[in-house]
Amino acid sequence: MRLSGNRYNEIDKEVIKLFESLTINKFLLNCFKICEQLGLGLIPYSQLTEKKRKVPLYEERLRCNRQVGYSYR
């Protein structure tokens, strides 16, 4: 999906604000630390219930309960 140039600029500004608020000033990023700073709990994808695994990602984002599943695939 292609976004408008303005939308990319908006996303860039939001990412910069996020990096500044979390004092991210070096790369490689530690996604676990970022989630911790944002108050997001991380659980392995393998520990999600079968029902949660079948929910499309975009629906899950709408109902986010401050937990994010992840996978090392």
Image (cartoon, rainbow, N blue to C red):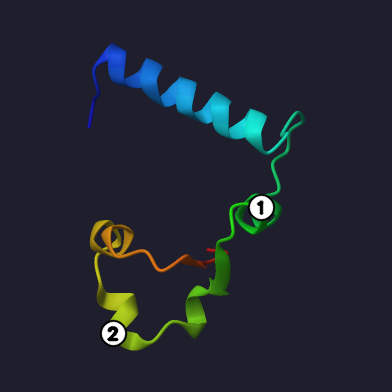
Q: Residue at x 50, y 84 (%)?
A: 47
Image quadrant assignment for residue 44? bottom right
Residue 1 screen position, x and y as percent? 22, 32
Residue 15 screen position, x and y as percent? 52, 29
**10 Å neighbourhood of mark 2: few (<14), some, or many (≥20)?**
few
Mark 2 vs 1, N-terminal side: 1
Element assignment for label 2: helix
Which residue lies under the disc numbered 2? 51
Amino acid of disc 2: Lys
Q: Residue at x 77, y 30 (%)?
A: 26
- As drawn, the residue found furthest toward the right would be 26
Residue 50 located left or right of residue 30: left
Q: Which of the two residues, 66 or 43, is positioned nearer the viewer here?
A: 66
Q: Which mark is residue 1?
A: none
Image quadrant assignment for residue 52? bottom left
Rendered position, 68 above or below 18: below
Rendered position, 68 above or below 34: below
Residue 59 screen position, x and y as percent? 23, 62
Q: Nearer the viewer, mark 2 or mark 1?
A: 1
Image quadrant assignment for residue 57? bottom left
CB under 8 Å between discs 2 and 1: no
Q: Which of the two residues, 24 or 54, is positioned nearer the viewer here?
A: 24
Which residue lies under the disc numbered 1? 37
User: Mark 2 to mark 1: distance in Å?
Assistant: 28 Å
Q: Which of the two residues, 63 or 52, is positioned nearer the viewer here?
A: 63
Element assignment for label 1: helix
Numbered label tally: 2
Residue 16 screen position, x and y as percent? 56, 24
**10 Å neighbourhood of mark 1: few (<14), some, or many (≥20)?**
few
Amino acid of disc 1: Gln
Q: Residue at x 29, y 13 (%)?
A: 6
